[in-house]
Image: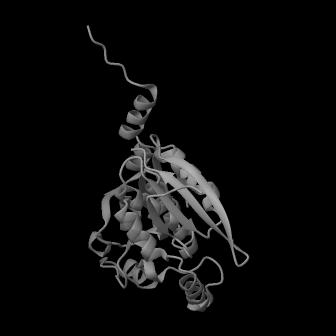
């Protein structure tokens, strides 16, 4: 009679293989520095073998909007809002010292000189590492943002239940 | 001196790039081979052991050298799985 027994270390490794740690990040802010922090954590977690989902809502949606995209909403109020609220990962302002764009440009220059990746590069890295992007449908409707004006990498459009279903399985859940 | 099979230069890169580059590079190694990660980011001293602990790879060791007053770190990681 033969018996196969799993080594405890193997069993643990297999368990970790099949059930990786889950990380969820809600990105509400559209500030460059905050979005950068979100992407640094997301890419770092993905590199550590964790399963990462990012939920973009309110101003955070600007990070996953195509550059220069405007609102196609029918009412003038939301259309106007779409013009004022610019999208695109390249155009996010700093939360402090933006100074009408001068401060943000200077910060980007310093980052470039120090070989620090910016939001667009970090976002591409996140997509390459398999981080999932989910856009919040409620705020998309509110702000007149249509599906077509979002970047291609957006995995799905969803609401709070999807977030909670993911978050309750997550060992790290962040709100930025 | 720890022997390595493959070297990875991450000099000049800040967090999280050294870890991301490591996670991509380690896949090119055979099981049991050792990757040497060169970095001048002080954070690597804590980050690389943490990365190993989470991913299951083995942290073989860390060497610190001075290069004109600036520390350079060499982290050695063995691919386990």
Snapshot quadrant of residue A105: bottom right
Q: Residue furthest top?
A: A1
Snapshot quadrant of residue B13: bottom right
Percent position of residue A11, x then y: 40, 29
Q: Give above or below for A50 relative to A36.
A: above
Percent position of residue A147, x then y: 28, 69
Q: Give above or below for A68 relative to B44.
A: below
Q: Is residue B69 left or right of residue A104?
A: right
Percent position of residue B15, x then y: 56, 66
Residue shown at 47% from the left, 83% from the top: A91
Is B81 in front, or is A82?
A: B81
Residue shown at 52% from the left, 70% from the top: B10
Quick one: quadrant of the C terminus of chain B?
top left
Q: Residue furthest right?
A: B69
Is B12 in front, or is B60?
A: B60
Percent position of residue B64, x then y: 66, 63
Q: Is residue A172 visible?
A: no
Quick one: quadrant of the N terminus of chain B?
bottom right
Give the number of callouts. 0
Q: Is residue A15 visible?
A: yes
Residue shown at 42% from the left, 44% from the top: B80
Q: Give above or below for A40 relative to B13.
A: above
């Amino acid at each position: 009679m033969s018996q196969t027994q799993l080594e405890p270390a193997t069993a643990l490794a297999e368990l970790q293989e099949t059930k990786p740690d889950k990380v969820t990040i809600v990105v509400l802010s559209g500030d460059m520095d905050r979005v950068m922090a979100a992407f640094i954590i997301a890419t770092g977690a993905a590199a550590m073998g964790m399963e990462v989902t990012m939920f973009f809502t309110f101003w955070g949606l600007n990070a996953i909007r195509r550059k220069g995209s405007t609102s196609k909403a029918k009412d003038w109020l939301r259309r106007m809002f779409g013009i004022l609220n610019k999208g695109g990962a390249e155009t996010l302002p700093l939360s402090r010292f933006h100074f009408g764009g001068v401060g943000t440009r200077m910060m980007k220059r310093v980052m470039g000189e120090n070989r620090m990746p910016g939001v667009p590069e970090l976002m591409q890295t996140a997509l390459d590492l398999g981080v999932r992007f989910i856009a919040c449908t409620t705020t998309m409707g509110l702000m007149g943002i249509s599906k077509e004006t979002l970047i291609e990498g957006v995995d799905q459009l969803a609401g709070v239940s999807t977030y909670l279903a993911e978050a309750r399985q997550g060992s790290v859940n962040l709100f930025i | 001196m720890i022997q390595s099979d493959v070297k990875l230069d991450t000099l000049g890169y800040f967090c999280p790039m050294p870890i991301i580059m490591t996670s991509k590079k380690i896949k090119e190694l055979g099981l049991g081979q050792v990757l040497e990660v060169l970095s001048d980011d002080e954070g690597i001293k804590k980050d690389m052991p943490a990365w190993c602990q989470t991913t299951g790879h083995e942290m073989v060791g860390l060497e610190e050298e001075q290069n004109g007053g600036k520390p350079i770190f060499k982290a050695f990681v063995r691919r386990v799985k």
